Image (cartoon, helix red, strand yellow):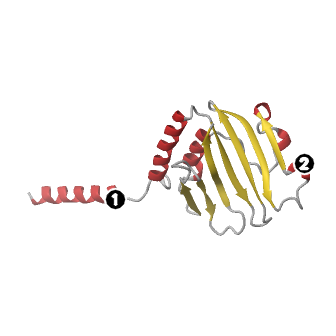
Amino acid sequence: MKNIILIITLLLASSIISSCSTDDEFNYQNDFEKSTKAWVDFKDSSNNSYKYVTLEGSVFTTYGWETTITVSNGVIIERDFRYTSGAENFIPEDQLEWIENQNEINSSEHEHTSAFPAMTLNEIYDKAKQDWLIERKDATPYFESENNGLISTCGFTLKNCLDDCFVGITIKSIVAL
């Protein structure tokens, strides 16, 4: 009888310990799942037609830029890029701002620019789960959902990195069309 009680006690203790484990499938899993639900609701209510603006910048160069992606019925129809300030002394005038229409999206003309690649929010949520939020011993993850529950910041920075280390996305705004 004592052996049965000991075995049951050990089984209960081990199940309690394993259920309290902090090892999630990926970082910020609960917050990400809530945001994914908000995304599905937004996608349905907007007929998968929306516009979002990403923000990026460089500590090294001291200027920033933003990319606006427009999606209609799940298809990217426009990518609009512009430097926000401080770049006019360093970047040629014809490269300070440009727009790609649907058949020009991610064209070779703008391949080596600072613009965020044209991605739908579906693709961003997939990349967040499969890349930006996976656990890494050498990185600090970030996840925020301040666009009415939708992703606003998602990515990571490598530890011991000094300048411009963030890998991921910062979304300034998301609006339905």
Figure quadrant of residue 57:
bottom right
Q: Position of residue 39 (x, y in %)?
A: 52, 42
Q: Which amino acid, by three-letter code, is at mark 2?
A: Asp
Q: Is residue 120 left or right of residue 40?
A: right
Q: Is residue 27 above or below residue 79?
A: below
Say what secondary structure mark 1 lies in: loop
Q: Which residue is mark 2?
A: 94
Q: Is residue 154 above or below residue 121?
A: below
Q: Nearer the viewer, mark 1 or mark 2?
A: 2
Query: Farthest residue toward the left?
Result: 1
C-alpha separation, residue under disc 1 versus residue under disc 2:
56 Å
- The numbered mark at residue 20 is 1
Compare residues 72 and 127 and report the one nearer the observer: 72
Compare residues 49 and 126 and report the one nearer the observer: 49
- Give the crowd class for mark 1: few <14, some 14-19, many >=20 residues within 10 Å: few
Q: Position of residue 79 (x, y in %)?
A: 74, 41
Say what secondary structure mark 2 lies in: helix
- Give the crowd class for mark 2: few <14, some 14-19, many >=20 residues within 10 Å: few
Which of the marked residues, 1 or 2, is nearer the chain's N terminus?
1
